[in-house]
Image (tube, rainbow, N blue to C red):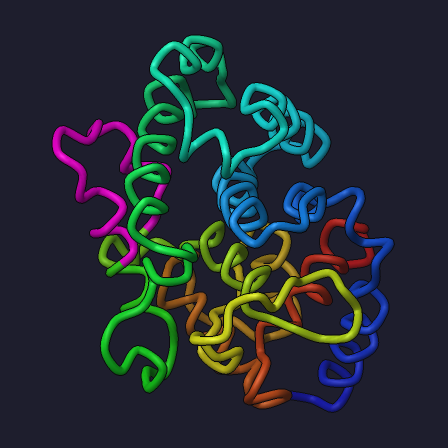
């Protein structure tokens, strides 16, 4: 990696990892809340729905929040069957009411037994792993552990087993795990290390990373996301995912 690339990424990380990044990004959705469980639920949902125009993603998430009486945790834990009728028309791209109802059913089952969504990603000695590959595999299996889960919903929850880059869930983990003094990411989870995070690899990040020589693998998949992250660890081995700000910002703002 050239000194030019290293200096550019550090400069752009500092430029884009700022509070003014929040309002126009899906991360603004969990920032609407202060309770940990609300942040987790809507952070996860915002990440899962994060494809298409950012303005549309944000609007659909706000619609979903209203349908849950502006209190997602209370709704998923305490709702009655009759409360679910209002959700039958919720849709974003290929995410429809069937998916919505399963998400709510799973959240209800999970939060009746656990305090934090972080627990769904953890397992014995998980903090000793090099990265979050097994965390994501375990989470996928747990998410589809309810009886008679809808097969169609699998496409919304990526897993490295299918060699997906897992962009959305990696972004969600960045939000929950990273903690710095800028306030964009939340840092409310402490059992996954920042050094384990894989950089979210969307079309903007992929394009800029290839331009800068950080990716050689021809197609975007899990192995590509790991390749990118390993190169970013040469700059910061303890927090490689922070450069998501730089790569995404350079791409979406049209600088590169």
Is 244 placed above or below 22 here?
below
**Position in image of residue 155 (x %, y %):** 31, 37
**Position in image of residue 128 (x %, y %):** 33, 86
Residue at point 71% right, 75% down? Answer: 180
Counting the numbered discs, the total is 0
Q: Is 106 in front, or is 25?
A: 106
Residue 155 colored magenta?
A: yes
**Position in image of residue 202 (x %, y %):** 55, 52
**Position in image of residue 187 (x %, y %):** 61, 68
Q: Is 220 in front, or is 70?
A: 70
Q: Is 183 in front, or is 77?
A: 77
Residue at point 72% right, 81% down? Answer: 5
Image side of residue 245 versus residue 67, left or right: right
Query: Which quadrant, please, contains the C terminus?
Result: bottom right
Residue bounds of the magenta highlight: 139-158
Residue at point 58% right, 80% down? Answer: 232
């Amino acid at each position: 990696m050239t000194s030019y690339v290293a200096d550019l990424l550090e400069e752009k990380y500092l430029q884009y990892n700022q509070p003014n990044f929040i309002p126009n990004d899906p991360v603004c959705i969990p920032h609407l809340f202060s309770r940990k469980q609300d942040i987790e639920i809507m952070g996860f949902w915002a990440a899962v729905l994060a494809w298409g125009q950012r303005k549309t993603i944000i609007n659909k998430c706000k619609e979903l929040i209203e349908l849950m009486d502006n209190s997602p945790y209370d709704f998923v834990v305490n709702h009655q069957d009759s409360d679910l009728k209002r959700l039958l028309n919720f849709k974003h791209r290929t995410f429809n009411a069937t998916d919505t109802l399963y998400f709510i059913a799973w959240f209800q089952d999970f939060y009746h037994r656990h305090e934090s969504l972080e627990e769904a990603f953890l397992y014995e000695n998980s903090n000793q792993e090099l990265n979050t590959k097994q965390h994501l595999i375990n989470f996928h299996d747990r998410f589809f552990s309810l009886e008679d889960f809808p097969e169609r919903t699998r496409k919304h929850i990526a897993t490295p087993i299918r060699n997906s880059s897992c962009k959305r869930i990696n972004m969600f983990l960045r939000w929950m795990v990273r903690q710095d003094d800028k306030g964009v990411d939340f840092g409310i989870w402490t059992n996954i290390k920042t050094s384990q995070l894989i950089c979210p690899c969307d079309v903007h990040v992929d394009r800029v990373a290839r331009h800068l020589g950080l990716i050689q693998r021809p197609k975007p998949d899990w192995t590509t996301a790991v390749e990118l992250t390993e190169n970013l660890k040469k700059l910061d081995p303890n927090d490689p995912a922070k450069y998501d700000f730089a790569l995404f910002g350079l791409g979406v703002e049209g600088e590169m």
